[in-house]
Image (spheres, rainbow, N blue to C red):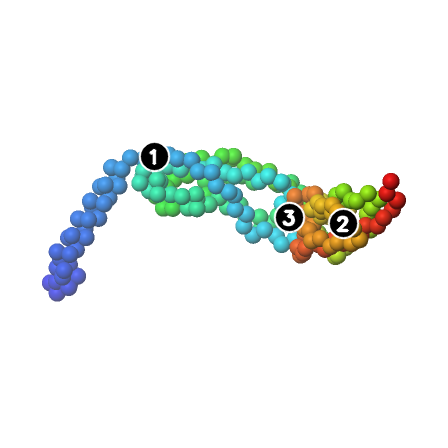
């Protein structure tokens, strides 16, 4: 028994007493530290999103989290330390309401979640779809008297788009950024990007579009 005490209790006793005293002082300092509440606006993280589904709600709200804890610990927090997680693992197409509770908020130890605003969010989902659509160049400009555009050619003339099924089906074509062909006599080739009007639909493999504009003399100058 004496040997056990000497080995585990009395050995380095001074260092152990200093460590114990430090722990007591630290606990005392923390326990006397004022408790404060703050609010953080953080994005909502969606986990386990099914690969064949897309969120069709254009604006996904952020969450405001009311946190409570010791002032020093709370003041050292950054928005990156607070995570609001919604699991979409069993999702199907259609509308769905998700409750936002304190259990879905991940915060550092010692910080308490007091409130989540909004208490729930409602989102819409659709199956992911893709299709090929033609590219329509947008060409503007003024030309010498008697000259006019006789042909406009886009290369590639089609692109693949991807997004929510219903929104993809509603699109007939992609457009290029405006091309100013002012002063072209004969032919000239320009490079532009293509885009679609729906913000939730995107080009599957973005690539620059080469647009060739050909002008000819269509009438005699007066």
Eye-nearest disc, 2 or 3 = 2
| Residue 41 position within the rendered picture, expressed as x and y whole percent measured from the top left | 47, 38
- 3 or 1: tag closer to the N-terminus: 1
Residue beneath the point at 73% across and 54% down: 189
Residue beneath the point at 32% across and 38% down: 71
Looking at the rendering, which quadrant does residue 67 occupy? top left
Q: Which mark is residue 36?
A: 1
User: Mark 3 — residue?
Assistant: 54
Residue placed most toward the observer, 174 or 46: 174
Q: Residue furthest front?
A: 222
Quarter placement of the N terminus: bottom left
Secondary structure of the residue carrying tag 3 is strand
Q: Is residue 213 left or right of residue 218?
A: left
User: Mark 2 — residue?
Assistant: 184
Eye-nearest disc, 2 or 1 = 2
| Residue 139 position within the rendered picture, expressed as x and y whole percent measured from the top left | 75, 46
Looking at the rendering, which quadrant does residue 125 occupy? top right
Residue beneath the point at 87% across and 46% down: 218
Residue beneath the point at 55% across and 38% down: 61
Secondary structure of the residue carrying tag 2 is loop
Residue placed most toward the observer, 117 or 16: 117
Quarter placement of the C terminus: top right
| Residue 96 position within the rendered picture, expressed as x and y whole percent measured from the top left | 62, 41
Q: Residues within 10 Å of mark 2 (few under 14, many from 20)?
A: many
Secondary structure of the residue carrying tag 1 is strand
- 2 or 3: tag closer to the N-terminus: 3
Q: Is residue 92 visible?
A: no
């Amino acid at each position: 028994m004496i040997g056990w005490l000497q080995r585990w209790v009395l050995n380095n006793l001074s260092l152990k007493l200093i460590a114990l005293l430090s722990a007591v002082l630290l606990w005392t300092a923390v326990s006397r530290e004022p408790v404060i509440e703050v609010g953080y606006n953080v994005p909502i993280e969606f986990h386990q999103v099914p690969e064949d589904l897309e969120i069709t709600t254009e604006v996904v709200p952020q969450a405001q989290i009311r946190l409570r804890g010791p002032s020093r610990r709370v003041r050292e927090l950054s928005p990156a330390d607070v995570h609001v997680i919604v699991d979409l693992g069993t999702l199907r197409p259609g509308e769905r309401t998700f409750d936002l509770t304190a259990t879905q908020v991940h915060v550092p130890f010692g910080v308490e979640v007091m409130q989540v605003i909004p208490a729930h969010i409602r989102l819409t989902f659709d199956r992911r779809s893709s299709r090929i659509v033609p590219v329509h160049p947008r060409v503007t400009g003024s030309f010498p008297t008697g000259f006019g555009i006789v042909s406009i050619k886009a290369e590639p003339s089609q692109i693949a788009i991807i997004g929510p099924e219903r929104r993809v089906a509603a699109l007939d074509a992609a457009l290029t950024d405006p091309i100013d062909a002012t002063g072209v006599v004969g032919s000239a080739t320009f490079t532009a990007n293509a885009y679609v009007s729906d913000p939730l639909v995107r080009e599957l493999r973005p690539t620059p579009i080469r647009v060739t504009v050909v002008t000819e003399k269509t009438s005699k100058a007066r």
